[in-house]
Amino acid sequence: MVAARALARAFHEANVTLVYGGGTEGVMGELAKTLVSLSGPTAVHGIVPWALVRPINSAEHDHDAPGGGKALEASISAAELEGLDRQATTTLQKQTKYGVTTVVPDMHTRKKLMATEVLNGGPGSGFVALPGGFGTLEEVMEITTWNQLGIHDRGIVLLNVEGYWDALLQWIKHAVQEAFINGDNDKILVSCDNVGDVLVALRNYSVAEGRLELNWNLG
């Protein structure tokens, strides 16, 4: 949680906005809540699938999942959700301590909208991964593969809190040694041990040599 709060302060000081998965729990919930407290609700846009929403009434409060681990990610007022089409993409009118929230029908829509917002951002926009579980790892690998394939050229930073991502970084080295990853492509992912280095790494990011330059324009 300390790293999440520190990253929020760094974003605030640099006037950076956050696009994330819309969770009100755990590390990402703390990052979003802290940034909103500093920069206001328009500084954070959370995008969450219906299946991961927990409706709450006015007497309830969002809270971390007991015992940690994966749980429903977003606690949202039942009144805000009433009557909405679960098959549609809807941005909720009410801004909360977690910012602006858009509810989407599925995971694919969520990831596409998140990526689109980042790719439409200004210079230095990119992707940052804090410690997380299966979902975090899957999203890191997908956006890294997109970079490798030439779909985007934005930086991808692992915030390596207390060595959390060391095993992944070691796996990348092993995959290069075994010739499953081109040696130059191991630079697609950038690891930062300190919060203060994250935005610098994004601003100074250069695409790895040897990545594929494919034509994704089907028009």
Image: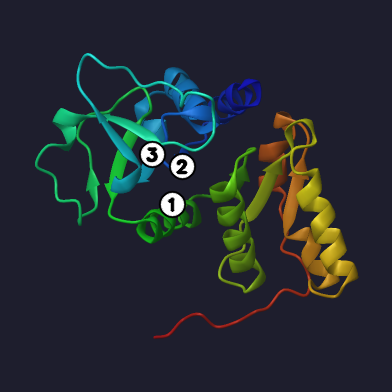
| Gap between marks 2 and 3 measured at Cα | 6 Å
Q: Earlier in the sequence, mark 3 or mark 1?
A: 3
Confirm or deny contact between disc 1 and disc 2 (CB under 8 A).
yes
Q: Which amino acid does label 3 sit on?
A: His
Dot 2 corresponds to which residue? 20
Residue marked by disc 1: 114
Measuring from the top left, give residue 107's x and y in whole percent: 39, 56
Residue marked by disc 3: 45
Q: How far apart are marks 1 and 2 (CA)?
A: 7 Å
**Residue 122 or residue 216, whichever sits in front:** 216
Please tell me the numbered disc located at residue 181: none
The amino acid type, in three-letter code, at marker 1 is Met
Residue occupying image coordinates x 13% and y 45%: 84
Q: Disc 3 to disc 1, how far (Cα)?
A: 9 Å
The disc, 1 or 2, on the residue closer to the chain's N-terminal end is 2
Label 2 residue SS: strand
Residue 219 position, x and y percent, is: 39, 86
For this orientation, the residue located farthest to the front is 67
> Position of 158 compared to 150: left or right?
right
